[in-house]
Image: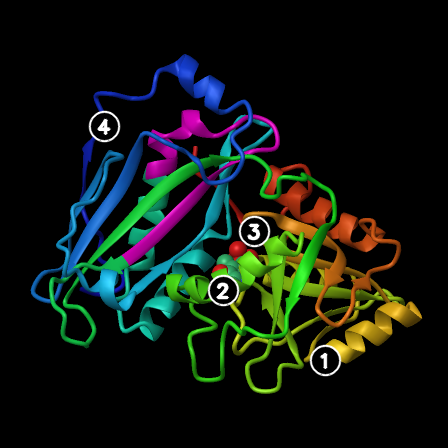
Amino acid sequence: MNAHSKIAFSRQPTDRPVAADVRAGLLQDPGFGKVFTDHMVTIRWSQARGWHDGMIGARAPVQLDPAAAVLHYGQEIFEGLKAYNRADGSIALFRAEQNARRFNASAARMAMPELPETTFLQAVDELVKIDSAWIPKGDGALYLRPFMFATEAFLGVRPSHEYLFMVIASSVGSYFKGGEKPVTVWLSDRYTRAAEGGTGAAKCGGNYAASLLAQAEAIENGCDQVVFLDAAEHRWVEELGGMNIFFVMSDGSLLTPPLGTILPGITRDSILTLARKEGRTVREERYPIEQWRADAASGKLKEAFACGTAAVVASIGKIKSGKGDIVMGDGATGPVTAAIKARLVGIQRGDVADEFGWVRRIG
Ligand SMILES: *Cc1c(COP(=O)(O)O)cnc(C)c1O
């Protein structure tokens, strides 16, 4: 199977879609990741047949053998992207081809088969089209979750010989319960999420499993999220459990940790591209935690924000840790963070010119 071959999809729309009035009720205040649409995409892979049995059908539970490799050894990867309703009535995806590419980079790291990028994009487009009534009006979006996992019934330890690729969709509003309020982040000085040579740059469920205890600690300490330091020295700021991090200095420059053990965020890349374009100095450099404390105290560091598809840009008001808190500026969302968020959301929604060709209409 080469990278350009197309997989045929069979279409079996559900005969029991959620009633329009029930759907309208669910879309009032969907929250994040709990309202699901009527359909899903499934494509199977086996060593003998490659990708086959592409289908778009009713959303339903998946049957798995209890010995399915994913349940024992966690061979699983995923993506996350959004479809937006735009002011002109069209539906658009933001840089979806980057998700397709990153999905295959994750697959390669986890010893899984690559999915032709055209198939990934076709699967996403078809699901958005069939479930377009589930895209909330206004600020919400349809969050798409492509994922793949090992289905072979085999307890020996080696890459599985069978996989299932799926796409599901969830109607979403704001990622954080507090809406636009700055978030408070817990600094984990005990747990790390990724080490050199590990899977930090792959979007795999295992990274999230390893982050949950630190995330629970964050919540116990009254925080929304956790920020991790590097595994070797426990000194260099890496990223949050599911978002990259940026710092805004008093000279207006941006600083963000370099790629390597962190997830190469598409939002991160978009912010770097936009900032460079507007003539801002941007540095992809390691930033030590003691410098973060000192710069926040001296006023050299003005703002910090987290970024990712789900929340887009979330201002960080305060860091809490066992060794004392760090407050950014006056704890409110800063002007640079607000401007970056407005520009990015504006491009996604069609209110700001899309100079980089990041937005693709699908209907
Ligand atoms: C998905 C993810 C991000 C953000 O990536 P985007 O492409 O911007 O959504 C950041 N960190 C981790 C660990 C992630 O899994």
The residue type indicated by label 1 comes to Pro
In the image, 187 versus 89, the foreground residue is 187
Q: Position of residue 206 (x, y in %)?
A: 38, 66
- Report helix, strand or loop for mark 3: loop
In the rendering, which numbered label is found on residue 211?
A: 2
Q: Position of residue 308 (x, y in %)?
A: 58, 55
- Report helix, strand or loop for mark 2: helix
Earlier in the chain: of badge 2 and badge 3, it is: 2
> Foreground mark, 2 or 1?
2
Q: Is residue 56 above or below residue 281?
A: above
> Foreground mark, 2 or 3?
2
Judge left or right: residue 43 versus residue 264: left
The residue type indicated by label 4 comes to Pro
Residue 4, quarter of picture? bottom left
Earlier in the chain: of badge 1 and badge 3, it is: 1
The 10 Å Cα crowd at callout 3, few under 14, some 14 to 19, many 20 or more, is few
Q: Residue at x 77, y 48 (%)?
A: 338
In reply to whether residue 70 is colored magenta, the answer given is no
**Range shown magenta:** 127-148
The 10 Å Cα crowd at callout 4, few under 14, some 14 to 19, many 20 or more, is some
- Report helix, strand or loop for mark 1: loop
Query: Label 1, on which residue?
Result: 288
Q: Position of residue 131 (x, y in %)?
A: 37, 30
The residue type indicated by label 2 comes to Ser
Would you say the residues marked 2 and 4 are in contact, meaning their CB atoms lie under 8 Å apart? no
In the rendering, which numbered label is found on residue 360?
A: none
In the rendering, which numbered label is found on residue 13?
A: 4
Q: CA distance from mark 2 to mark 3?
A: 34 Å
Q: CA distance from mark 1 to mark 3?
A: 35 Å
- Report helix, strand or loop for mark 4: loop
